[in-house]
Amino acid sequence: MAQQILLKNSDVPGLASFEVYRKLGGYASVEKTLKNFTPDQVTDEVKKSGLKGRGGAGFPAGMKWSFLDKSTSNPRYFVCNFDESEPGTFKDRHIGQLNPHQLIEGMILGSYALGARTSYIYIRGELFYVLRIIEKAIEEAYANGFLGKNILGSGYSLDLYCHPGAGAYICGEETALIESLEGKRGNPRIKPPFPAIVGLYDCPTVVNNVETIANLPWIMNNGAEAYAAIGVGNSKGTKLISACGHINKPGIYEIELGLPVEEFIYSDEYCGGIRNGNKLKAVVAGGSSVPILPAELILKTAKGEPRLMSYESLAEGGFETGTMLGSGGFIVMDETTCIVKNLLTFSRFYHHESCGQCSPCREGTGWMERILHRIENGHGTMKDIDLLVSISKHIEGNTICPLGDAAAWPVASAIRHFRQEFEDHVKLQKCPLSK
Amino acid sequence: MSLVKVTIDQIEVEVEAGTTILNAARIIGGNIVPPAMCYYSKLEGSGGKCRTCLVKVAQGSAKDPRPMPKLMPSCRTLVQDGMVVQNITSPEVMEARKAITEFLLINHPLDCPVCDQAGECHLQDLSYDHGLADTQTVEDRRTFAPIDIGDKIKLHMNRCILCYRCVMVADQLTDHRVHGVLGRGDHCEISTHILKAVDNDFSGNMIDVCPVGALTDKTFRFKSRVWFTKPFDAHRECTKCIGKVVLWKKGDEILRVTGRKDKYGELEEFICNDCRFEHKEPNDWQIEGPRKIERHSVIGQNHYEKL
């Protein structure tokens, strides 16, 4: 059994309540940290642990914290990004729903390290039931002295709020999230300046993903060395993978980074193989925005080495033959899947969710969706396939925020690896897999 | 203020620290100035959205000579000492600009023949310089019905490129903005809040800052093509604004009053609606003389002063 940090007690009934969580050793890290560590020592500890951001970009969390501008007397803010809306990703909801106190515990540690006196959990609007669970957990934490004024007599005070979004994928981009939290339209800001310098209410701010924050209590309890001992290479610790698609056992799995992809898909401990004994066709390894890979490239790298579930191994080969670990939304497709139709679904999503602020993303996402719709329904031409490649190339890198890239990568990679299937759609004037 | 050296398309210029690449390019002038559809020097926080001014930063600064990994919006990127920028000398930039122009046009109705902005439209200039001769789209374009956004302003949402300038002008010039961007993505639209109309003393500036024909002057609509009218600098005593305007005359008749725009099409001063809409008699104004329009587009070709 692999090391469990986030899902360890998730089958204990009533884990969401303070009593149960406390009895299982919860909030011990807060007691230990506020007593024995200075804020800078906490940051150092996180840096040493090698914890990477779990939201998708995989930026080292400790390094992000160290960018925080501490030169001004402005208040600082610590914000939890709970706007999980990437298609295929549903891991954060699991933490918020079953184990909200671990998230709150992590929020206290992070806020203490950064010197924040007010912190926010920005939760996706659709997760209204999770919002209620978290709000109740926050109340309990206040009632037991882990939030509020002078926490455990340490002199450190923290107020924590949970704020729901209004149903926009774009508010998962950190600057759009900050705008939304300020009560404005969720348009991403133009960077630089980065939130660590000018963030929420123009004050230094750090935004971290739910899973990143939920790892903090374990790191403070067991030490950075213990955390860094888990995993492979620069991919330290465990990662929640939300596996879905044509597998026998869809669900949320906690893996130690470095697990072979093949074992993850076929072992009974995890996905349990492809449904109905079908053949694996393709995998989107880290949420809808990362490049899709065909079966042969997801199981083995282009060099023929087995591919591992880690930041480096999945990225090996660049975008030509690799992909990204992303947010851990693992979408598996078997041989009955139409890649074009799947891509159309993704493109429709990005078209719907583009904020409309900058022209390449606003116009390009809709255009790609319309072309894919045409190809899937048998009205495409060979020129359309090249046009899609050229549009995706022109969106990529030319937009304000990464949503443009996220919309362009699936299109570019699907055509790169499955061009034949697009051409078959054009030649047959219909989807070859439709009955 | 300390001065920094920056090279744009092999031309070196010294500018104050904190200047953007676009403004440094404007100091050099000429054809190396990137086009800007959403940036407006008089509006704080504008720019960065349309992406037509993307440039390549081949060298970040003298201290850190690494190139920037992506094309940068020149209107929002500050110069560093020793920075090397490529605009028209970079094929990558020119390709991106062509693509952005195409993106801006795929939902644009291309109704220049019936659009009041034709002749002084920035999108028209941009497509003349960077547009394709042929269209690659076969789909229907996004359409909206034209609406009255206030008693003096017509909104043709079809033509809008969502530069946010009119939103910023309302935010920065007036106390209570009643219009904004509704919706998301390419189904965004500029509209007033429920049961509100744009009605304040400076609303007319929304028309002047609009780079395209989305917001037009209802008192001038369909009266004349702009290139048939002759611009004159004029002023009057005004209690609300500076009172310095451009009169657009056809014969002796004043068809339209606008603010004075510089060669990049940006207002020098904002003017009030009183001057803009209510004073169209010749004896309302002290005429200073013909106004030279320094633009390469149709409106700049008006060599009437010899007549």
Image (tube, rainbow, N blue to C red):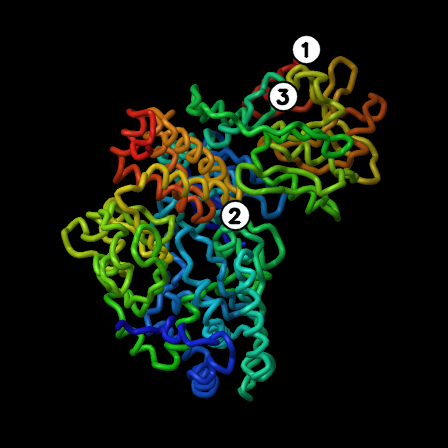
Tell me the CA gap for discs 1 and 2: 42 Å
Question: Residues at badges 1 and 2 in contact (C-beta under 8 Å)?
Answer: no
Asked which quadrant contains residue A28, the reply is bottom left
Q: Dot 3: what SS? A: loop
Please check whether the numbered discs 1 and 2 fall on a single chain. Answer: yes
Residue drawn at point x = 67 percent, y = 14 percent? B228
| Quarter containing the N terminus of chain B | bottom right
Q: Chain of mark 2?
A: B
Residue carrying label 2: B19
Return the disc, 2 or 3, that comes first in the chain's sequence.
Answer: 2
- The crowding category of the residue bearing disc 2, from other C-alpha atoms within 10 Å (few below 14, some 14 to 19, many at least 20), is some
Tell me the CA gap for discs 1 and 3: 28 Å
Asked which quadrant contains residue A368, the reply is top left
From the viewer's perspective, is residue A251 above or below residue B76? below
Inspect the image, locate mark 3, and give the three-letter code of the amino acid beneath it: Cys
Residue A129 horizontal side relative to residue A45, left or right: right
- The crowding category of the residue bearing disc 1, from other C-alpha atoms within 10 Å (few below 14, some 14 to 19, many at least 20), is few
- The crowding category of the residue bearing disc 3, from other C-alpha atoms within 10 Å (few below 14, some 14 to 19, many at least 20), is some
Q: Is residue A112 visible?
A: yes
Inspect the image, locate mark 2, and give the three-letter code of the amino acid beneath it: Thr
- Which label sits on residue B115? 3
Residue B140 horizontal side relative to residue B158, left or right: left
Return the disc, 1 or 3, that comes first in the chain's sequence.
Answer: 3
Residue drawn at point x = 26 percent, y = 65 percent? A269
Q: Chain of mark 3?
A: B
Tell me the CA gap for discs 2 and 3: 36 Å
- Count the marks: how many? 3
Question: Residues at badges 1 and 3 in contact (C-beta under 8 Å)?
Answer: no
Inspect the image, locate mark 1, and give the three-letter code of the amino acid beneath it: Leu
* Front-lying residue, A210 or B85: A210
